[in-house]
Image (cartoon, rainbow, N blue to C red):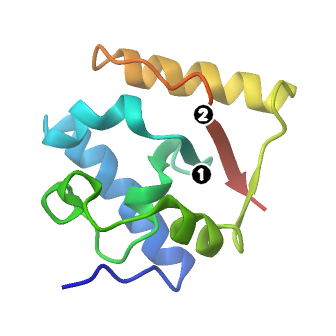
């Protein structure tokens, strides 16, 4: 069954919550933290989620299946209707990148050097 892209911001929000639950539960997605390039931040929840995970409907670690059959190109196109990419090196981007690095380092992983942070428009 092919993964369906999200069509509502509420679905993205639920996926970000689920991603963080999966991390906290020690799910397999932890091993993939270094692979994610585009991160989406929800200020009201103070949570991050990666594009390829949060851009598909009803996502969880087992459904994510290490990203098989999923592409960031598709999720980026959908997510940009609600989010904007922060300018590299901007004050806001630097602040959130430190927050993201702290999150990922808590799982003994590193954020990709070419990672981006996106926030709600």
Image-quadrant location for residue 17: bottom left
Residue shown at the point (67%, 49%) measured from the top left: 118
Is residue 95 shown left or right of residue 32?
A: right
Residue 38: percent from left, percent from top: 57, 46
Residue shown at the point (32%, 51%) measured from the top left: 19
Residue 68: percent from left, percent from top: 25, 61
Residue shown at the point (87%, 28%) measured from the top left: 90
Q: Nearer the viewer, residue 68 or 45?
A: 68
Residue 54: percent from left, percent from top: 43, 61
Is residue 35 shown left or right of residue 40?
A: left
Mark number, residue 44: 1
Q: Nearer the viewer, residue 62 or 121?
A: 62
To which residue does mark 2 refer?
115
Q: Secondary structure at mark 2?
A: loop
User: Height in image: 30 above or below 41?
Assistant: above
Q: Secondary structure at mark 1?
A: loop
Is residue 89 shown left or right of residue 112?
A: right
Q: Residues within 10 Å of mark 1 (few under 14, many from 20)?
A: few
Image-quadrant location for residue 69: bottom left
Residue 34: percent from left, percent from top: 39, 28
Is residue 100 shown left or right of residue 21?
A: right
Tell me the quarter of the image containing the C terminus: bottom right
Image-quadrant location for residue 1: bottom left
């Amino acid at each position: 069954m092919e993964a369906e892209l999200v069509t509502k911001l509420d679905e993205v929000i639920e996926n970000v919550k689920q991603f963080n639950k999966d991390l906290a539960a020690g799910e397999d997605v932890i091993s993939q933290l270094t692979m994610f390039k585009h991160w989406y931040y929800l200020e009201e929840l103070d949570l991050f989620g990666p594009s390829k995970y949060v851009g598909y409907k009803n996502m969880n670690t087992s459904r994510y299946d290490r990203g098989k059959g999923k592409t960031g190109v598709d999720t980026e196109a959908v997510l940009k209707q609600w989010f904007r990419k922060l300018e590299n090196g901007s004050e806001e981007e630097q602040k959130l990148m430190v927050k993201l690095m702290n999150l990922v380092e808590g799982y003994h992983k590193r954020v990709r050097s070419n990672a981006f942070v996106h926030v709600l428009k």
